[in-house]
Amino acid sequence: MRKFLAPPILLMAVVSLAFGQTPGVETKPKRNPLVGKWKANLSKSQRDPNHQFQSLALRFEISDDELLLTFTGISMSGKEESGVQKIHPDGKERPVAEAQGIVEVSRWVGSHTLESVAKKDGTVIGASRYEVSSDGKTLTSKVKGTDAKGRQFEQVIVFDRE
């Protein structure tokens, strides 16, 4: 499946979650600010000239040890595209099933931000940072790397909560 926002590994780098627990104290986890549906606000985004998709929507779901990202949208050429990515935000290097020879590391940075880095043969080939605003209404995705055609890109995509 062709990806229009970024290679599969960069999409995996999309998120932010925190459970707000104090060590040694049993508390019910807070709702993760990333969970839910998001729609790209193209007028607020700074898209790369080679990545001018027409629309993009994300949905994040959370389980005990992973984050599930579902995306749908319309590519630059008008083709409908979609996919699902599993993200393990535990700071451990993991192989990317969809991209042989590539590993990713994802980790939470605070309660509203997730960072991911993709590497091939020990060299960083992409990085992403996804941050939910303090009011929970906006998600900002900063993604940079090399696309499937070998071109460098960098973009900021702003999403509104649906």
Image (tube, rainbow, N blue to C red):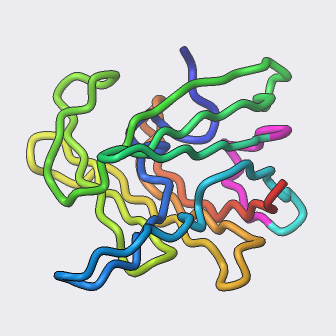
Give the residue drawn at x 79%, y 18%. Answer: 79
User: Residue pushed farthest front?
Assistant: 26
**In the image, residue 76 lies at what x, y percent?**
79, 31
Dividing the image into 4 quarters, which one contains the C terminus? bottom right
Looking at the image, which is closer to me, 110 or 55?
Answer: 110
Using the rendered view, name the quadrant where residue 42 is placed.
bottom right
- Residue 148 vertical position relative to residue 38 in the rendered view, above or below: above
Q: Find residue 94 and report its horizontal and vertical position in percent.
A: 17, 40
Q: Is residue 10 magenta?
A: no
Report x, y in % for residue 127.
38, 58
Q: Position of residue 148 (x, y in %)?
A: 46, 30
- Nearest the eye: 12 or 54: 12
Stretch in magenta: 45-55
- Residue projecting furthest to the top: 1
Task: Identify which residue is drawn at 70% across, 21% down.
Answer: 81
Relative to 109, 25 lies left or right: left
Q: Is residue 72 left or right of residue 155?
A: right
Viewer-proximal residue among 31 and 87: 31
Residue pictured at 19% horizontal, 60% vertical: 91
* Rendered image quadrant of residue 97: top left
Furthest residue toward right: 43
Q: Is residue 25 above or below residue 107?
A: below
The rendered magenta stretch, by its main secondary structure, is classed as loop
Residue at point 25%, 46% (across, down): 104
Q: Is residue 20 left or right of residue 93?
A: right
Q: Is residue 66 above or below residue 73?
A: below
Instruction: Judge by depth and name the residue closer to the eye, 134 or 157.
Output: 134
- Image quadrant containing the N terminus: top right
114 sits left or right of 40 in the view: left
